[in-house]
Image: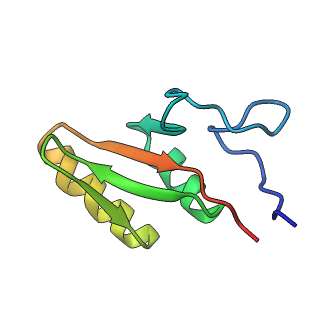
Amino acid sequence: MTKQRTKIPALDDNGKFVYKDKQTRDIQTHDISCAVSAYKEGYEVYALSPSNAVRLFSIEEIEDAYEKQATAKDNLFLIREVEIK
């Protein structure tokens, strides 16, 4: 049985995950609140840079990544759906 998620910016009105990239099923966002909400709901969250993607494992890591990226004016997060059982 899959755990029911609450509505976050990555979900549509029917509770379906909205994919901006249909092939990878990922969402890219500059919005830290969306990244934190997605992390709380069990999605994988990554900090993206031109050279790599780093998975973030806590809200503190998301906030730290945002602060570091904000100085570079390149704060981009990737949200990836994972199955929760």
Residue 24, x across and y down, in percent = 48, 37
Q: With 48 as the anchor, is 18 left or right in this view? A: right
Position of 6 compared to 25: left or right? right
**Picture layout, residue 65 above or below residue 12:** below
Pick whichever, 5 or 66, lies toward us: 5
Q: Residue furthest front?
A: 23
Residue for point 55% across, 61% down: 39
Horizontal and vertical percent position of residue 73:
17, 37
Q: How many marks?
A: 0
- Residue at 58% over, 31% down: 19
* Residue 12 occupies quadrant: top right
Relative image position of residue 61 (x, y in whole percent): 34, 69
State the colouring used for the structure image: rainbow
Q: Is residue 52 left or right of residue 41?
A: left
- On screen, residue 2 versus residue 62, left or right, reads right
Which residue occupies 45% across, 68% down? 59
**Residue 18's quadrant in the figure?**
top right
Where, quadrant-wise, is the C terminus in this rendering? bottom right
> Which quarter of the image is occupied by the N terminus?
bottom right
Q: At 69% across and 38% down in the image, what residue appears?
A: 17
